[in-house]
Image (cartoon, rainbow, N blue to C red):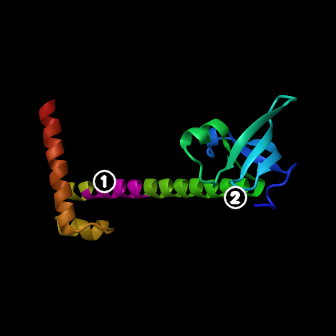
């Protein structure tokens, strides 16, 4: 920690300890080596004055309670903040990839269902339909799907 904590070092400060929020640049004014609490001078945007914060714990420190975290906020080094941002970007990109894969899977399944009903309407049997559509379709799953769709058609027709 001593390499990170030196008076005059720039760190990032998280208001209320919310690391998902936008950090504020801060300069270390004083520190308590024992429990990693700092006194910081925040460099607030659009102002010419520094804002002092004391008893600011490191983001990885054991903080006595949530009220303390919210009251004093938390800090971390510029490098730790950079790593956090890169990790959150990686997580976000993974979520986007997963959503794209799910969408592609849904579109494929929707297309396959359409094919199943189209082939059923031509008079083909479930086994023939499953062989032609492929994928995860079996004669049994085709039969169940056709049966459920037929019920939906009947129910929709009786509502009119």
Left or right of 23 on screen, residue 134: left
Q: Residue 35 appears in which quarter of the rendering?
A: bottom right
Q: Residue 22 appears in which quarter of the rendering?
A: top right
Q: Horizontal and vertical percent for residue 8? A: 88, 48
Upstream in sequence: badge 1 or badge 2: 2
Which residue is pictured at 70% across the width and 44% down the height?
56
Which residue is pictured at 78% across the width and 49% down the height?
31
Q: Horizontal and vertical percent for residue 158? A: 11, 34
The C terminus is located in which quarter? Answer: top left
Q: Nearer the viewer, residue 20 or 101?
A: 20
Is residue 140 shown to the viewer in this render? yes
Q: On screen, 23 above or below 130?
A: above
Tell me the number on the disc at residue 114.
1
Q: On screen, 35 above or below 134?
A: above
Q: Secondary structure at mark 1?
A: helix
Tell me the number on the disc at residue 147.
none
Q: Read off the magenta span.
A: 105-116
Tell me the number on the disc at residue 83.
2
Q: Are marks 1 and 2 in contact (CB under 8 Å)?
A: no
Judged by its main secondary structure, the magenta piece is helix
The N terminus is located in which quarter? Answer: bottom right
Neighbor class of circle 1 (other Cα within 10 Å; few <14, some 14-19, many 20+) is few
Q: Secondary structure at mark 2?
A: helix
Which residue is pictured at 33% across the width and 58% down the height?
112
Q: On screen, 22 above or below 103?
A: above
């Amino acid at each position: 920690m001593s390499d990170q904590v030196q008076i005059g070092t720039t760190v990032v400060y998280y208001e209320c300890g919310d690391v998902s929020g936008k950090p504020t640049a801060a300069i270390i004014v004083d520190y308590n080596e024992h429990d990693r609490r700092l006194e910081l001078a925040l460099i607030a945007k659009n102002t010419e004055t520094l804002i002092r914060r004391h008893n600011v714990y490191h983001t990885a420190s054991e903080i006595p309670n949530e009220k303390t975290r919210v009251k004093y906020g938390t800090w971390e080094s510029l490098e730790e903040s950079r790593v956090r941002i890169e990790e959150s970007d990686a997580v976000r990109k993974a979520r986007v990839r997963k959503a794209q894969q799910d969408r592609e899977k849904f579109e494929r399944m929707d297309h396959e269902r359409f094919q199943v009903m189209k082939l059923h309407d031509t008079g083909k049997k479930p086994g023939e339909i499953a062989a032609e559509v492929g994928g995860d379709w079996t004669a049994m799953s085709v039969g169940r799907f056709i049966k459920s769709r037929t019920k939906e058609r009947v129910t929709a027709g009786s509502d009119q």
